[in-house]
Image (spheres, rainbow, N blue to C red):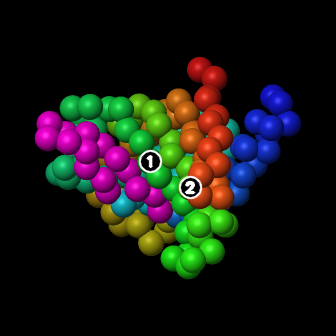
Amino acid sequence: MSPDTQSIQTQLSRLFAQQRLGVLATQHQTGPYTSLVAFHAAQDLRSLLFATARSTRKYANLKATPHVSMLIDNRSHQENDFHQAIAVTATGRAEELAGPEQQAALVQLKARHPVLVEFYDSPTCALIRINVTSYYLVSRFQHVIELHMQT
């Protein structure tokens, strides 16, 4: 791993530790659809976890078209965001977890978002993993760095 890659991964890990919510973009027949979701990033950054009710539009979209993106940022809604905020878009493929993978994800999500434990335990809740293919990190308003995950 190059020093640049390690630096980017450190920056992503720091951002993901600080932020609890991301904006998930899914696709449906008439166009894109976005949703605010509570997420957890894997330590190796290869995946992002979130949960949704199976009755939601986002779940139907994921089942129809599993290619998704998620935006995570640290904006403060101040003018200095143009120079100091960072945002990352993760792209990848979403899949619903089952069995031991689902149980492991449940433990991680509950630890990260204890206020959502009741929701996570609901039988209508689906645990979703995004297998990340690429990250696009934007800083200083227009400086873009790409990190492509090895498969």
Question: Does 111 sit above or below residue 29?
Answer: below
Query: Tag 2, which secondary structure?
Result: strand
Which residue is denoted by mark 1 in the rendering?
70
Q: The N terminus is located in which quarter?
A: top right
Residue 30 part of the magenta-drawn span = yes
Q: Nearer the viewer, residue 46 or 23?
A: 23
In this view, which residue lies farthest toward the right?
3
Give the residue type that dot 1 points to: Met
Q: Main secondary structure of the magenta part?
A: strand
Q: x, y percentage for residue 50?
A: 42, 51
Q: How far is disc 2 from disc 1 in space, using C-alphas? A: 10 Å
Give the residue type that dot 2 points to: Ala
Label 1: how many residues lie within 10 Å, few (<14), some (14-19) or many (20+)?
many
Q: x, y percentage for residue 140?
A: 65, 58
Which residue is denoted by mark 2 in the rendering?
87
In this view, which residue lies farthest toward the left?
30
The stretch of residues the image draws in magenta is 21-35
Query: Tag 1, which secondary structure?
Result: strand
Q: Nearer the viewer, residue 41 or 85?
A: 85
The reply to whether dot 2 and dot 1 touch (C-beta < 8 Å) is no
